[in-house]
């Protein structure tokens, strides 16, 4: 019979039996009494649901039932039909491991089975191969562990009770059985136990991986990879999990873990992918929830040192942690979690620095949340202390951080516009910054983990998906929408594999199958993600500037109101709903668009990128702003920012694509109750989870389906051992095998191509297969044992025979040796007798021979003695003859002298002394002659030997000259033969129309780039090696050269490079003269690999050597051969060769090579020879990447000629054979590096342009075509012919519009294209066309791959290299080390063309490449300069004007300081320049990291040296260097050279000064803080500031301004004579804001107010018209300074106490010349004349002024007399009383002009004080009008020198003044102070 389960009235009824024979229905139970007896187990319908129940009683026709869930129900006996109550099957009563075996197949039975197993702590249940896991919320003893793992290892699914290990075991072995990737999807609600299930699976797979190596030695690093995979979990949990209302450890991100296995079943590595981290949780949490675990773990687990360093407190003190009211949980041990996180980081190979960086950023995020904002003309930060703390933790500039949080910068029409944010916007900026920091840190940690666990190419992988569960809160927001969308996609994947694909497979194969209905969620997904779906509308509205949450909701209602899966609320509000597979969820649209847009502004991104922390920079390095920083070609480059939802959608689709490539398994996690407590089962909650997860349909399809399916061929192949003896087709064989074990055909069916099995039958087949294989294995073992036994027997038999043979041989050999010994005795005696006889005969012969030899030796000695005596006699005779000749000559001279003396004695008596001196000189000459004679006698022997050598050398020289003559004749013949070739080349050059192709310059001889080729090829160049002789045209001659193509460089040499080293040097000796030994001859030396040093008169290959020195036989190589510089010596037997090299470096190189040659082996000598074939020895070099074309000339007379064309010249060569020419042409073809055109490209732009030729001053019209490689130009529009020329474009090219119009037609507009070696001026028809061309070329430049120089490539290599590799890089790459040679090109790629900034043009700078080389030359010049400061100033000024060169200069300085010559003055000078650079400018982050590495490497390598002191200074300097407005002053440079701080002098009223030590980054705010602390005014309500002051000129310095910049500006002012009356500029400390004017009279602050008030009076800034008031103030001042009046006292200078002149006009003139930004613009000669010619020259006016002054002096003196006896304190107090009598005291007055209308006078005072902003007529006591700050809506400078105030009621006041910035800054300071004061007053009331 077949059991059907039919739904009745939406309820599952009991089973109904169908009788096959009668084919009619019959009730299975004919009587109801059978299962209505008390104690019977039944299914009872209660409230429309089936529940398990027990029959308690059956009395009086009424039956009472008790539900297993605690309910009681009574039913009438006649009402107990099958629709109300049914019997419970035994399987439901006892319970089953696999719910597919339940006989009662309905929801209640499934729920009851799960409940019973849960009560018994059997939390796992199978549904076929699907596992249902119920979270017990408690530890279950004996459920996990190594022993349990062993029980499930190698067990088939179903053999053991359900367990998570059973699924993991099945997945692992399916990996090999199916030979395809596996994955397991763990799903369920939040708190259902998904994360714990993931851990158990990973642990089991890790254990199996460990066992896979068996008894063999584990693979390298095996334990480390396993430990890493397991230890990554605590880190990710801490950073990605948090406590929610449903779960204490809820995953707030999705992760897909891939475990990579090799073919042996071992885990080689892994990868973790993350999806949708809930960033919003960082800044806000729902009630009763917590932030991410890591924050609490950090606060609770950090040690005291870390807490002190990061200033960590209790969690309740942080805004980001205390919002929800939940900061702790008894079930979570935060301190222990922190230790586990640190242990995991150690395992994952986080360095100590990495860990500190991560924790520091987390601490910075916590403190960032405590920043509060107040409203004061926009949002302002309430406390500076917390801002400074955050800036320190994040290594940010505090002022830049403040601007990023409170201001918004926009670029409009090429100008930056800064607008203040309100408090809400500022809070959003703060929160977006915190979220970005946390998200990027999370991604960095994940990337670090992946790099640690990443393996090699894996065989297969197992994926474990642990993703957030379905969520439905009271308020569901953007995060819940994305989470539920992901779950909806996963449910679709589940449905697809469990229902859709399975049923489709059955239908396709023709399997007898009853279709099962299941809930399809495709339409719900279409609502969300299809076109015009919710996501589409959300992205569209997010990109719409005016889009709001309300407009988005309206569009949703309009588009989807009729969709059955969309829920439109009946009452209008801010929500919409979706009917998900798990139920209906309502979503709140509040803030939805902002979250989708991600309000992370570019200002914050730029601030974080400017962080001094390399870690923070790395977090945001690859994050691009929405608007690029550069505006090239007059337009900004906008980048469309991807929305959060689109990013999540893409990542989700990527996940589904990955899952679709693997065989899936499913684990359904179930939450038993909503309270997260153990031993509580809530049926309704569990039932809802079972329903939306499709569990009922899953049970039915698993029960009725066939989950195992194999192709017939695969099935037979695997079970062929069971198919022995069965013949037929594959289908028949498969069916026969299955029928053997299941004849009823219930558990299997045959399809068209596959056999379908149930899991039970597969298990039976697998067991039988193993049994059969075991039997076969026994037979094989028996045969093998027999074979091995027989083999062992035969081996033993052969051994016995061998022993017998050996023994017999031994016996007979013993007998033979006995006879042999006897024979040898006889032979011994016979040979001894013969030997003794021969010995005596030979002894006699020896004696006779010795006597003969002694006689011959005696005769030779006698003959030699006679010969020596003869030679000695001849020498003496010769000396006597020479002496006689000299004496005769001297006698003759003496006689002549005596005669001359007699003849002149009477005329010149004084000549006697001269004659005596002459005689003395003659005597000395005689002595010298004697010494010379002796010396000649000593050298006579050596001279005779050298005479022969000189003759030989002369003969060789004559032969060489003759050979050269023959070669010249041959060259002349060659020239005449290739006349046709020359004419052809000239014709080709003339036809080029001055068109040249642009390319990079080839490296010249000896360039470091050419040397670099020996160790590393640039990317894109294949290694080609070819060498041979070529005839090359050099000037007007043709010369034969040895050419080599190696390492991407074409080199040509004078001769074949079969030597180790060669070069010109001077050699002492040689020639035919008598004194030839004293001569120095220039010779060409060649050292070959046979250890012989030959020298030649010419450097030609055919030259013959003049001499050879065998280095192998040399005694020593002398470092200093003579006293001359650059000399060395070679000492051989009997002689020392003295040689002088061309330079000291060349000398050291020769000595080093010669010494190595002496000590090296033959192999090392050959290696030295191969290394010598480089650019240093070449006549010239050519980089093949710079070759534009290499083609045969195709000349009839010279068929082997070919040409090489570059941007600089045309090279002409002739090969020996046609084959050689083809080989060279093929090898020298352009490689396509950087700029070479590789084929036809799409046309981007085309049209006619006028091209100017600067060499011939021609203007030609050409048709230009722009493609992705460059600009091709033609003579006509026919582009099918080859172009006339080409301008190749790479990433360094630049293009811009020309400033002037060219051509006769004024409508034409030209633009400049800068390429490698030249620039092109092209003219279009109109300005619009020119702009279009410029923009198109810019697009091509942006798309070209970046050019990387060798230095930049090596810097990248060093970043990722290990310590040993780093030293190797430095050793084999001299381009990184110090050099005394000049650079041929810059170290870094620099844009082509001249710099276009106005500053660069006015200073006359050239191209960046030229300036880079000039700076390097300056560095080399300053090494020997007496005063390096001017050179340093020039370098720093260039770097300030051209910021593009800063990275280049840093690389040059690092190169020039990278040497081991620590005592070199040149290196010291370079370190000094580096110290100045580090104190002035910072390089880009990439090179800053390289600089720090260089400094640390120097500190570690050379401790306790002078250079390390500079290294330490530079290290500290780069930590604090700020952006500068001026290059350093001379004083600052001197301080940097001395590695000390700079001293600044600060002045104040009364002549007081204070010296303060500052560094190059000290700000004015820091100085003010230090001064305020020193003088005790820190607690003052008034605010002090630093001012720039010169005479009456004064300007407040912003707190963020660098004091060193101010001093540098002062130095420039002094140099240009910009001052007032010859006075010096100085720093001045005084009051800035008067917030409390009533201070104590004896306080220091009162003295500041007094002096400042006095200064305002003197400058005419005190509003009073009464002269008597001014006279009294002057008298009080004199009384204060001098004391009582004394007889005869007089006032020498009235101007010091009385406002003698009104200086308003003077100040206005100065203000007009005084610039706002501190530059020198506007302060030229005209302004200087104004400063010098202020006073009037009118004599009449002078007389009147003098009379008035005298009268004022008398009045002041009279008033002074009346103050007799008044103390200083009283005088000061009365002075201030007069000042305070003005109601506007405390105001700062600014001279302004009012030109808006006629309401007010033109000349006004703008007064700013604590209460208001007022306008005064100059000199008046009462204001014309005043505006309290509460009435001021906005203020600022809309245009230059115009200040505008807008008040309530649309009142606008606009005045003109050059001090708009100072006014705005002062108003902002007052507003901030007022808001702070009010907030402080409100705090006690709130408390």
Image: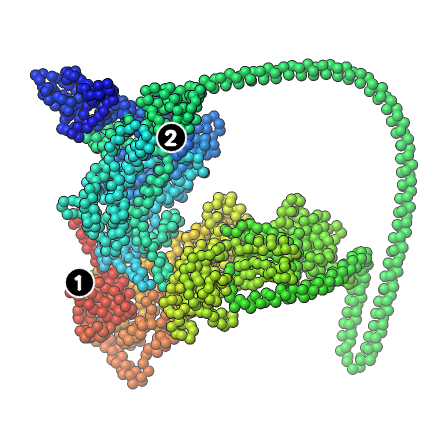
Residue 1755 placement, left or right of 1497:
left
List the single residue furthest toward the left.
60
Please indicate whether residue 1350 sits to the left or right of residue 701 in the image: right
Q: Residue at x 24, y 20 (%)?
A: 20
Viewer-side residue, 43 vs 315: 43
Quadrant including the N terminus: top left
Q: Nearer the viewer, residue 153 or 823?
A: 153
**Residue 1591 location, x and y as percent?**
33, 70
In the image, residue 103 above or below residue 550 = above
Residue 1708 quadrant? bottom left
Which of the marked residues, 2 or 1, is nearer the chain's N terminus? 2
1575 vs 333: above or below: below
Taking the spot 88% from the left edge, 24% from the top edge, the residue there is 833
Instruction: Residue 1084: name its quadrant.
Output: bottom right
**What residue is shown at x 25% (from left), y 81% (from top)?**
1748
Asked if residue 1559 shows in the view, the reply is no
Residue 473 position by quadrant: top left
Q: Residue 1678 or 1844: which is nearer the viewer?
A: 1844
Going 35% across and 58% down the picture, which residue do you hit? Answer: 637
Q: Position of residue 840 (x, y in %)?
A: 90, 29
Q: Image height check: is 1123 above or below 116?
A: below
Q: Which residue is mark 1?
A: 1831
Q: State the CA–CA distance, disc 2 to disc 1.
A: 88 Å
Classify mark 2: helix, strand or loop.
Answer: loop
Observer-nearest of 1712 and 476:
476
User: In the visual, does 1671 lie left or right of 624?
Assistant: left
Say left or right for 621 vs 968.
Answer: left
Residue 1490, image x, y percentages: 45, 51
Q: Residue 767 at what x, y percent from top left?
A: 39, 21
Residue bearing mark 2: 753
Q: Mark 1 Cα within 10 Å, few/some/many (few <14, many 20+)?
A: few
């Amino acid at each position: 019979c077949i059991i059907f389960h039919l739904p009745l009235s939406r309820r599952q009824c009991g089973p109904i039996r169908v009788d096959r024979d009668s084919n009619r229905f019959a009730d299975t139970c004919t009587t109801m009494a059978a299962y209505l007896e008390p104690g019977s187990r039944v299914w009872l319908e209660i409230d429309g649901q089936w529940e398990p129940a027990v029959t308690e009683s059956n009395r009086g026709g009424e039956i009472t039932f008790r539900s297993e869930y605690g309910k009681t129900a009574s039913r009438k006996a006649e009402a107990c039909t099958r629709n109300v109550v049914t019997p419970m099957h035994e399987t439901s009563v006892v319970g089953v491991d696999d719910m597919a075996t339940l006989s009662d197949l309905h929801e209640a039975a499934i729920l009851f089975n799960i409940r019973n197993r849960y009560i018994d702590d059997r939390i796992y249940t199978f549904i076929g191969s699907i596992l249902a896991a119920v979270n017990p919320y408690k530890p279950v003893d004996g459920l996990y562990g190594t022993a349990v793992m062993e029980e499930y290892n190698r067990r088939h699914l179903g053999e053991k009770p359900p367990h998570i290990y059973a699924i993991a075991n099945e997945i692992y072995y399916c990996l090999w059985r199916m030979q395809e990737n596996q994955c397991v999807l763990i799903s369920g609600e939040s708190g259902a136990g998904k994360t714990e299930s993931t851990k158990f699976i990973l642990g089991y797979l890790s254990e199996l991986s460990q066992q896979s190596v068996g008894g063999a030695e584990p693979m390298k690093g095996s334990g480390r990879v396993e430990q890493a995979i397991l230890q990554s979990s605590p880190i990710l949990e801490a950073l990605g999990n948090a406590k929610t209302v449903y779960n204490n450890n809820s995953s707030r991100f999705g992760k897909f873990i891939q475990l990579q296995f090799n073919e042996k079943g071992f885990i080689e590595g892994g990868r973790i992918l993350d999806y949708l981290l809930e960033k919003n949780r960082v800044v806000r949490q729902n009630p009763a929830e917590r932030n991410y675990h890591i924050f609490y773990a950090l606060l609770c687990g950090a040690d005291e040192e870390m807490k002190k360093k990061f200033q960590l407190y209790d969690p309740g003190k942080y805004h980001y942690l205390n919002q929800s009211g939940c900061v702790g949980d008894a079930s979570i041990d935060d301190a222990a979690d922190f230790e586990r996180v640190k242990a995991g980081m150690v395992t994952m190979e986080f360095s100590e620095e990495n860990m500190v960086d991560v924790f520091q950023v987390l601490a910075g995020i916590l403190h960032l949340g405590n920043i509060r904002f107040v409203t004061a003309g926009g949002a302002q930060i309430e406390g500076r202390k917390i801002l400074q703390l955050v800036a320190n933790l994040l290594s940010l500039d505090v002022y830049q951080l403040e601007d990023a949080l409170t201001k918004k910068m926009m670029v409009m029409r090429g100008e930056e516009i800064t607008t203040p944010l309100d408090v809400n916007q500022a809070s959003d900026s703060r929160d977006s910054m915190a979220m970005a920091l946390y998200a990027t840190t999370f991604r960095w940690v994940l990337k670090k983990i992946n790099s640690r666990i990443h393996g090699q190419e894996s065989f297969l992988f197992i994926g474990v998906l642990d993703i957030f569960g379905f969520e439905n809160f009271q308020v569901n927001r953007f995060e819940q929408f994305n989470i539920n969308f992901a779950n909806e996609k996963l449910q679709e994947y589940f449905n697809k594999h469990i229902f859709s694909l399975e049923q489709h497979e059955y239908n396709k194969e023709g399997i007898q199958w009853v279709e099962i209905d299941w809930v399809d969620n495709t339409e719900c997904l279409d609502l969300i993600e299809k076109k015009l779906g919710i996501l589409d509308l959300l992205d569209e509205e997010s990109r719409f500037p005016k889009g709001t949450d309300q407009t988005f909701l309206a569009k949703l209602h309009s588009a989807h109101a009729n969709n059955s899966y969309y829920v439109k609320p009946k009452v209008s509000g801010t929500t919409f709903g979706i009917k998900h597979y798990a139920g209906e969820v309502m979503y709140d649209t509040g803030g939805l668009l902002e979250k989708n847009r991600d309000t992370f502004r570019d200002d914050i991104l730029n601030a974080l990128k400017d962080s001094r922390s390399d870690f923070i920079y790395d977090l945001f390095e690859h994050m691009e702003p929405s608007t690029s920083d550069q505006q090239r070609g007059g337009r900004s480059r906008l980048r469309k920012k991807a929305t959060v939802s689109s990013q999540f959608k893409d990542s989700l689709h990527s996940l589904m694509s990955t899952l679709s490539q693997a065989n899936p398994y499913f684990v359904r996690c179930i939450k038993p109750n909503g309270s997260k407590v153990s031993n509580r089962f809530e049926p309704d909650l569990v039932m809802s989870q079972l329903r939306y997860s499709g569990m009922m349909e899953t049970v039915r399809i698993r029960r009725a389906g066939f989950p195992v399916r194999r192709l017939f061929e695969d099935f037979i192949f695997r079970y062929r051992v069971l198919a022995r003896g069965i013949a037929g087709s594959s289908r028949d064989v498969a069916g026969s095998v299955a029928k053997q074990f299941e004849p009823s055909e219930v558990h299997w069916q045959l399809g068209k191509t596959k056999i379908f099995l149930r899991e039970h039958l597969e298990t039976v087949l697998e067991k039988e297969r193993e049994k059969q294989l075991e039997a076969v294995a026994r037979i094989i073992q028996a045969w093998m044992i027999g074979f091995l036994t027989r083999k062992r027997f035969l081996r033993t038999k052969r051994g016995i025979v061998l022993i017998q043979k050996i023994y017999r041989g031994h016996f007979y050999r013993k007998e033979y040796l006995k006879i042999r010994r006897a024979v040898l005795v006889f032979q011994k005696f016979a040979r001894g007798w013969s030997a003794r006889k021969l010995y005596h005969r030979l002894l006699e012969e020896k004696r006779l021979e010795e006597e003969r030899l002694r006689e011959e030796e005696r005769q030779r000695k006698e003959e030699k003695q006679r010969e020596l005596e003869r030679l000695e006699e001849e020498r003496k005779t010769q000396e006597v003859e020479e002496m006689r000749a000299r004496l005769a000559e001297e006698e003759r001279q003496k006689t002549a002298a005596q005669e001359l003396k007699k003849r002149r004695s009477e005329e010149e008596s004084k000549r006697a002394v001269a004659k005596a001196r002459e005689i003395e000189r003659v005597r000395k000459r005689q002595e010298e002659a004697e010494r010379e004679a002796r010396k000649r006698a000593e050298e006579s022997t050596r001279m005779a030997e050298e005479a022969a050598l000189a003759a030989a050398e002369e003969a060789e020289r004559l032969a060489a000259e003759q050979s050269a003559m023959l070669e010249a004749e041959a060259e002349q013949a060659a020239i005449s033969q290739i006349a046709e070739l020359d004419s052809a080349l000239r014709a080709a050059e003339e036809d080029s129309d001055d068109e040249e192709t642009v390319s990079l310059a080839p490296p010249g001889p000896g360039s470091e780039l050419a040397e670099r080729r020996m160790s590393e090829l640039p990317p894109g160049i294949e290694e080609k090696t070819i060498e041979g002789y070529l005839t090359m045209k050099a000037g007007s001659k043709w010369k034969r050269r040895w050419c080599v193509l190696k390492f991407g460089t074409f080199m040509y040499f004078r001769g074949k490079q079969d030597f180790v080293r060669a070069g010109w040097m001077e050699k002492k000796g040689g020639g035919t003269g008598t004194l030839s030994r004293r001569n120095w001859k220039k010779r060409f030396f060649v050292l070959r690999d046979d250890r012989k040093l030959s020298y030649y008169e010419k450097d030609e290959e055919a030259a013959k050597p003049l001499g050879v020195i065998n280095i192998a036989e040399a005694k020593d190589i002398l470092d200093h051969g003579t006293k001359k510089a650059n000399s060395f010596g070679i000492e051989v037997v009997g002689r020392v060769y003295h040689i002088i090299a061309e330079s000291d470096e060349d000398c050291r190189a020769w000595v080093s090579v010669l010494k190595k040659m002496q000590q090296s082996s033959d192999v090392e000598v050959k290696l030295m020879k191969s290394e010598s074939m480089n650019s240093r020895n070449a006549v010239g070099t050519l980089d093949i990447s710079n070759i534009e074309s290499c083609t045969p000339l195709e000349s009839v007379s010279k068929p082997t000629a070919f040409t090489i064309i570059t941007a600089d010249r045309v090279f002409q060569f002739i090969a020996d054979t046609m084959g050689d020419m083809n080989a060279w042409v093929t090898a020298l073809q352009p490689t396509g590096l950087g700029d070479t055109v590789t084929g036809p490209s799409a046309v981007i732009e085309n049209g006619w342009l006028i091209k100017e030729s600067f060499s011939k001053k021609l203007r030609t019209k050409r048709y230009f075509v722009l493609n992705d490689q460059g600009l091709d130009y033609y003579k006509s529009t026919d582009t099918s012919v080859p172009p006339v020329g080409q301008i190749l474009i790479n990433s360094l090219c630049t293009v811009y519009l020309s400033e002037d119009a060219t051509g006769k037609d004024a409508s034409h507009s030209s633009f400049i294209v800068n390429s490698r070696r030249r620039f092109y001026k092209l003219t279009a028809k109109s300005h619009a066309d020119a702009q279009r061309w410029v923009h198109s070329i810019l697009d091509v430049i942006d798309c070209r791959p970046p050019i990387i120089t060798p230095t930049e490539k090596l810097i990248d290599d060093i970043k990722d290299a290990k310590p040993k590799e780093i030293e190797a890089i430095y050793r084999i790459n001299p381009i990184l080390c110090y050099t005394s040679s000049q650079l041929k090109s810059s170290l870094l790629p620099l844009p082509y063309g001249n710099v276009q900034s106005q500053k660069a043009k006015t200073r006359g700078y050239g191209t960046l490449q030229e300036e880079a080389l000039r700076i390097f030359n300056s560095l080399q010049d300053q090494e020997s300069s007496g005063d390096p400061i001017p050179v340093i100033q020039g370098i720093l000024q260039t770097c300030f004007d051209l910021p593009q060169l800063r990275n280049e200069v840093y690389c040059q300085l690092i190169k020039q300081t990278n040497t081991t010559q620590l005592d070199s003055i040149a290196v010291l000078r370079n370190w000094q320049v580096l110290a100045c650079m580090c104190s002035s400018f910072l390089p880009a982050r990439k090179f800053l990291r390289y600089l720090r590495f260089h400094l640390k490497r120097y500190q570690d390598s050379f401790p306790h040296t002078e250079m390390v002191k500079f290294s330490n200074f530079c290290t500290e300097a780069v930590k604090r260097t700020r952006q500068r407005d001026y290059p350093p002053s001379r004083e600052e440079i001197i301080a940097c050279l001395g590695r000390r701080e700079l001293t600044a002098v600060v002045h104040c009223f009364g002549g007081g000064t204070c010296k303060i030590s500052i560094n190059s980054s000290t700000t004015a705010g820091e100085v003010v803080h230090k001064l305020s602390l020193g003088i005790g005014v820190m607690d003052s309500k008034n605010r002090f500031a630093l001012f720039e002051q010169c005479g009456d000129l004064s300007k407040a310095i912003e707190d963020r301004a660098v004091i060193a910049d101010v001093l540098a500006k002062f130095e420039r002012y002094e140099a240009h004579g910009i001052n007032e009356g010859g006075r010096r500029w100085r720093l001045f400390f005084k009051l800035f804001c008067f917030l409390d004017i009533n201070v104590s009279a004896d306080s220091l602050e009162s003295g500041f107010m007094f002096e400042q008030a006095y200064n305002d009076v003197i400058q005419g800034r005190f509003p009073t018209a009464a002269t008597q008031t001014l006279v009294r103030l002057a008298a009080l001042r004199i009384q204060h300074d001098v004391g009582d009046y004394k007889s005869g006292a007089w006032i020498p200078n009235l101007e010091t106490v009385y406002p003698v002149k009104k200086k308003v006009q003077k100040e206005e003139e100065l203000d007009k010349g005084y610039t706002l930004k501190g530059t020198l613009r506007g302060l030229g000669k005209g302004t200087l004349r104004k400063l010098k010619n202020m006073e009037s020259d009118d004599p009449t006016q002078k007389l009147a002024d003098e009379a008035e002054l005298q009268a004022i002096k008398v009045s002041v003196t009279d008033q002074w007399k009346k103050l007799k006896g008044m103390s200083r304190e009283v005088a000061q107090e009365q002075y201030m009383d007069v000042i305070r009598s003005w109601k506007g005291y405390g105001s700062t007055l600014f001279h302004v002009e009012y030109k808006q209308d006629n309401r007010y006078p033109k000349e006004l005072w703008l007064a700013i004080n604590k209460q208001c902003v007022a306008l005064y007529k100059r000199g008046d006591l009462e204001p014309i009008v005043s505006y309290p700050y509460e009435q001021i809506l906005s203020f600022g400078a809309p245009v230059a020198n115009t200040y505008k105030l807008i008040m309530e009621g649309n009142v606008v006041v606009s005045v003109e003044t050059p001090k708009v910035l100072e006014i705005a800054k002062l108003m902002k300071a007052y507003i901030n102070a007022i808001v702070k004061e009010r907030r402080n007053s409100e705090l006690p009331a709130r408390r």
